Image (cartoon, helix red, strand yellow):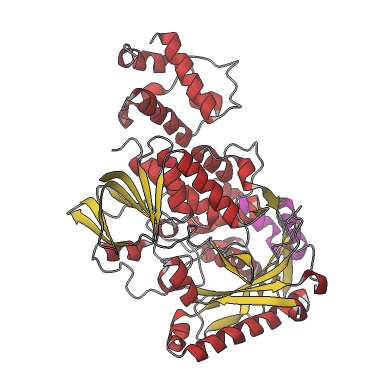
Amino acid sequence: MTREDIKALILEIIHDIDDEADFDNLQPDQPLRDQLDLDSMDFLDIVMELRKRHQLQIPESDYPRLATLNSCADYLEPLLQDA
Amino acid sequence: MKVPFLVIGGGLSGLAAAIRFARFNPEVLILEKHTRIGGLNSYFYRNNRIFETGLHAITNYAEAGDRKAPLNRLLRQLKFSRDHLDIHQQICSEIVFRGAERLLFSNDFQLITEQIATKFPHSSDGFGRLVTLLDSFDPFRIAPFRSARQFLADILPDRLLVDMLLCPLMFYGSSIEDDMDLSQFAIMFRSIFQEGMFRPGETIKILLDRLLDHYRNLGGSIRTGAEVREILHDGRKVHGVVLTSGETIDCGVVLSTIGLDETLALLHRPPLSGDTIRLGFVETIYQLQASRCPALPADRTIIFFNNADSFHYRRPDQPVDFSSGVICLPMNFAGLGATSKEVRSTHLASYDQWQARAADRRAYASLKVQTAERSRMVLEDIVGDFGQAIVFQDTFTPLTIERYTAKKEGAIYGNPQKIKDGDLGYDNLFLAGTDQGFLGIVGSMLSGVSMVNQHILNKF
């Protein structure tokens, strides 16, 4: 998966959590949680969807690395290179 | 066969926990002892119609757009459509202390604020301060017991107001006598006074069926009539359960929703809360014939009342304490085209006193009839006469509740001692539901969801 594919995947998962989420003004280097009003329970959905769709088991200590759209791409790119 | 995730108990917390897990992995099994799901909020058939066992109202009403509200967070976590709830809001509820004062409240928090400003002017500023304090208070932080009564007494100069505010919150969720834990108070103040109450248009059965359909569509499994006799473990590690049928089911992780002592018993461990008092209740349902129906109030949904000189929320010395209680008029939710009318009453009761009469079936049956009569008279003083319109009535005693819900001593709010983090000291066995500390339909479902989030998802 390319970085752009990964970003699209994350947005697709978030849209699935909240179909009214507004991505128009989303800053890729700013925290997703603040911009999209996601709480920690919603955030867990992202982790679990990645596990369900791509068998990725992301340890809790790595959750901060999924904070922004850019950091998601940084973190997931090597993990999803064959996906 | 090994089940990765096993849920003991098909009440609302167990259902919610299982749905939450099944969203990401369909290998979940719910074991429910009874033939019907729902736990405390179930239903039964009598007199050719369906009756709800426990439902008065669902607390935690929230508008659809309020993302942070517990109700909407719950729906999001379960991916369960809000439309399935078929929300009908309460019209107006009331706290009535005879000979003293009355307070109205509704899903508009402004109403009770104004009522307090008018009727308790000395406490009006204090009430504002209370709301501000609660706004910044985190009730989910694990903290030792702190008396809500003392906390309120320090802020509100009117002792009567303290009792009147505590009365509905206690009747809808306190497992301890004459007080509440401050965290519990904060949660319930928000869910009842600040958010409010509603009910589904039809019966709880429709909601339970929809939850079960959703769960099954996600691939989850359920077995009813499957009572767990023993939880098998090797030190801190649980590896299976044995059913009363003798069947063994191997499993990965277990979430028990059947209560703290009830779970410990399956592990052959003594109860944690030795001789603490559990609060029992009696509930009577009066089904009324609409055509003969008297002029019951059309603008009151739930009435919390106290007729005694001072308000006591404790186990009575008699089978039933008729001096206080709750009246529910289930037809008085907005937009219900109710064809049948019903009145429900709840009072505190003593499990021991009912138990003592259980051996003599006739004495027990006659006490049930007397209880229904006496409760009706207490209610009629408040809502007007309806006795002549009754076509059917049924009374649940603490023994009935124990039999059908498996709640020890019929204590619907469970153990006075709560395990707020759900941690029972095992690697892969956790507690959710009533004894984890969240109450009500929304609360217990959030309990199931949050214990799965905290202990199970992405942890195994």
How many marks can you see? 0
**Is residue A37 covered in magenta?**
no
Residue B458, x across and y down, in percent: 33, 35
Tell me: B362 left or right of B202: left
Whether residue B259 appears in this view of the structure is: yes
Dominant secondary structure (helix, strand or loop) of the stretch shown in magenta: helix
In magenta stretch: residue B121: yes
| Quarter of the figure with residue B436 | bottom left
Q: Can residue B311 be seen in this view?
A: no
Identity of the residue drawn at 45% across and 35% down: A40
Q: Residue at x 43, y 52 (%)?
A: B14
What range of the chain is rendered magenta?
B110-131
Q: Give the percent coordinates (x, y) of residue B121.
A: 74, 62
User: Is residue B20 placed above or below A31 in the rendered structure?
Assistant: below
Residue B273's place in the image compared with A80, above or below, is: below
The quarter of the image holding the N terminus of chain B is top left
Apparent side of residue B184 relative to residue B375 in the rendered image (left or right): left
Picture residue at 43% right of the left edge, 87% below the top: B356
Give the vertical position of A80 relative to B308 (above or below).
above
Residue positioned most to the left: B234
**Residue A72 percent location from the top left of the image:** 40, 18
* x and y, in percent, of residue B344 in the image: 65, 70
Judge by depth and name the residue closer to the eye, A25 or B151: A25
Quarter of the image with the C terminus of chain B in it: top left
Q: Which of B166 and B75 is in front in this view?
A: B75
**Residue B118 in the figure: left or right of residue B15:** right
Residue B130: name its quadrant: bottom right
